Image: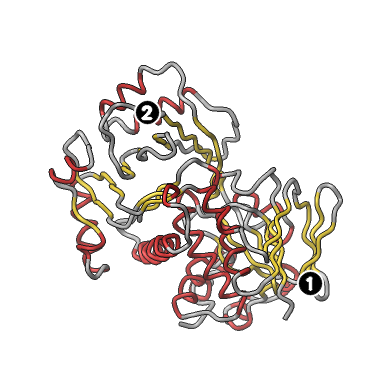
Amino acid sequence: MQKNILIIGAGIAGCSLAHFLANSDWDVTLIESKDNIAQGGSGNPVAAIYPKFMLNDEAYNDFMLRSFRFTTDWISQLGLNKEDFRFDGAIEILEETYTKKLEINLSKKITSKEDFFSLINKSILSKYSIERNSSGFLFHQGGWINPIALCKQLTNHSNIKIITHQKIKSIEKLIDGWTLKTEDKKTLNSSHVAICNAYSVNQFDLTQHLYTDAFRGQVNWITSTSFSMPPIVTCDEGYLAPLIHDKHVFGATYAMNDFFKDLRTSDTKKNIASIKGIHRKFYNYCETQKSIPGRVAWRASTKDRKPYVGQVFDNQLFKKMRVRELARADQLPWLKNLYIASGFGSRGFTFAPYCASVLANLINGNLSQEDKETLNYTNPERYRLKKMSLKKVASQIYKV
């Protein structure tokens, strides 16, 4: 097997996949339309990493738990500079009744729960400089990462070549590989292709059915202040990060399919309001500022909040097949050597590294049972199969 691959998109998903494949002797070419890696949603000054659980979605919670544990352990072993990440805790403030119900669910799922989370109490509120009486969780392994530093670390490998300023216009299947054509009329060839370009995943004919929404997010920041501030990531309606490279970052807004690029004063006000319950003095200080810097980026999200990770169908073969043929998982018409990793939403830095490791295992042909469970969950073709009343096969493409 030829071990060369073109990866479209150099955000956290593309950089993570490049890292895992380069470390298993693949020649990787990472293609980015902007002037550098990590310029889209992966280019914010800080990314909060903590497990965001749902009350009534056990499959999602299992996926979240696997992703969070993998990603925090993996990042801790990468050799990043200590000023570029910390996993010394993250607080999530929640309504009291919701907290109690979620605690019951998590206690059934998590062994050694005392090492994983604590319920917020007065002692924790005081220790982490939270000024209001709140309920919720302290996740002991939660924290933050410098996204650009992480992506640079991941792509610092002799097997990885980075091409910037190149927007891919088309992907064409050859007999023994793939041809990618750029808007500048350049041609790139490879035996394998991975599409990791967030909300633009459906721009190609082969993947136009993979719908995603683009969520505009604005974050803001204030430089260091004289206040006693929370030393760890704290999340309420919004999140407030500790002092990182002389910035307290807070946010973020969400606006679906809104492509306004400049900072909005209205969004800055929303971000300020979202941290009122975390730190009132900091909130009041922000309210008095005439201008607050920030950044706008877009995240890709699917309708069911589950990312697209895996393979897609050969559309020509798919259209010719009958429902009873598609009902057999072993007959599904997968398109050979084309892969997808997209739709990670606001949890990109929790989900994408883990999913990239699973996708790399799929490409290398060494899937574990857990990998298969994950790929069943993230199957990019789940919507097309469900529309044909094939929900069961959509979630059982791999036997586990």
Q: Can residue 239 be seen in this view?
A: no
Colouring scheme, one of rainbow, by chain, secondary structure, one colour: secondary structure
Category of crowding for the residue at label 2, using alpha-carbon neighbours closer than 10 angstroms: few (below 14), some (14–19), many (at least 20): many
Q: Quadrant of residue 229?
A: top left
Q: Quadrant of the N terminus?
A: bottom right
* Residue for point 35% across, 54% down: 87
Q: In this view, does 236 lie to the left or right of 373?
A: left
- Residue placed under numbered mark 1 in the picture: 177
Q: Position of residue 281 (x, y in %)?
A: 26, 25
Q: Is residue 202 left or right of residue 90?
A: right
- Work out which residue is located at the far left of the displayed protein and give it: 122
Q: Is residue 229 left or right of residue 185?
A: left
Q: Label 2 sits on what residue type?
A: Ile
Q: Label 1 sits on what residue type?
A: Gly
Q: Is residue 179 left or right of residue 200?
A: right
Category of crowding for the residue at label 1, using alpha-carbon neighbours closer than 10 angstroms: few (below 14), some (14–19), many (at least 20): some
For label 2, the SS is: helix
Front-lying residue, 231 or 376: 231
- Residue placed under numbered mark 2 in the picture: 272
Specify which label sits upstream in the sequence, 2 or 1.
1
* Vertical comparison of 199 with 105: above or below: above
Q: Where is residue 31 in the image (x, y as percent from the top left)?
A: 71, 55
Q: Where is residue 377 in the image (x, y as percent from the top left)?
A: 47, 68
* Residue for point 49% across, 34% down: 218
